[in-house]
Image (spheres, rainbow, N blue to C red):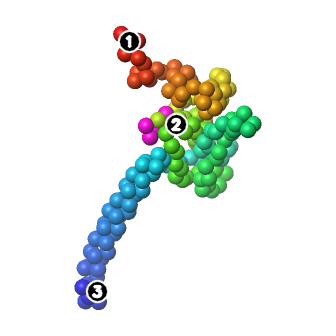
Amino acid sequence: MELEKLSNEELISLVEEIKKIIYKRKKEIERIENTIEEIQGNYKFEFNAKRKDKRPYVAKLIYKYKTATLDWKFEYLPFSKIDGFFVVRGIYYAKENDILDILHSDKRRIYIIKDGDLLELFDPDESNGSNNLLTVKQALKGDFDYNNLIEFVTGEIDEESVLDELKD
């Protein structure tokens, strides 16, 4: 195809067709990247928050065996300050059973990754938040499993983890 011989309308049409092809290929690449991340045990999440008083964040909670303390590993997410607001947008990855402390635009919550989704556990700023953080610390230390953690802090029992004899 000789581009010099094409009319303006044909060139515009060609450009639009190329844009569609590029868009489809980008989506396919994104799908493949997400599949690779899932195979590796990572799930992809988007974060978009805006706050005036504090910079929004995503932090993975970890247990430090050396000091026997709970620690926060903050994700680096690009931010800017616009009209006095912190604006944070970015992508982060988390694995199954990772426990995250997320400060959103309107609230701070503790989550666990369950089946590739964010499952809200509790608000650490509520009256029982410090007790729940101690429970998270125990789970991260390995004192009990993550299903027990979910049941304890949410009060919801995982039906699949209940023995059949107890269901009746």
Q: Is residue 138 above or below residue 16?
A: above
Q: Which residues are magenta?
A: 115-119
Residue 96 visible in the displayed image: yes
Q: Callout 2, which amino acid?
A: Asn
Looking at the rendering, which quadrant does residue 116 occupy? top left
Q: Callout 3, which amino acid?
A: Leu
Q: Is residue 51 above or below residue 78?
A: above
Identified at 38% across, 12% down, the residue is 165
Which quadrant does the C terminus fall into? Answer: top left
* Distance (Cα) linking label 3 and label 1: 74 Å
Identified at 42% across, 53% down, the residue is 36
Q: Nearer the viewer, residue 101 or 47?
A: 101
Q: Which residue is mark 3?
A: 3
Identified at 59% across, 44% down, the residue is 58
Q: Find out whether the residues at labels 1 and 2 contact each other: C-beta distance under 8 Å.
A: no
Side of 148 relative to 64 (left or right): left
Image location of residue 87, percent across then percent down: 60, 51
Residue 103 visible in the displayed image: no
Q: Is residue 33 above or below residue 99?
A: below
Which quadrant does the N terminus fall into? Answer: bottom left
Sooner in the amino-acid sequence: mark 1 or mark 2: 2
Image location of residue 65, percent across then percent down: 70, 37
Sooner in the amino-acid sequence: mark 3 or mark 1: 3
Which callout, 1 or 2, points to the residue nearer the camera?
A: 1
* Distance (Cα) linking label 3 and label 2: 55 Å
* Main secondary structure along the magenta-highlighted residues: strand
Q: Which residue is mark 2?
A: 97
Does dot 1 land on a helix, a strand or a loop? helix
Side of 98 relative to 23 (left or right): right
Q: Which residue is mark 1?
A: 165
Q: Find out whether the residues at labels 3 and 1 contact each other: C-beta distance under 8 Å.
A: no
Q: Residues within 10 Å of mark 2 (few under 14, many from 20)?
A: some
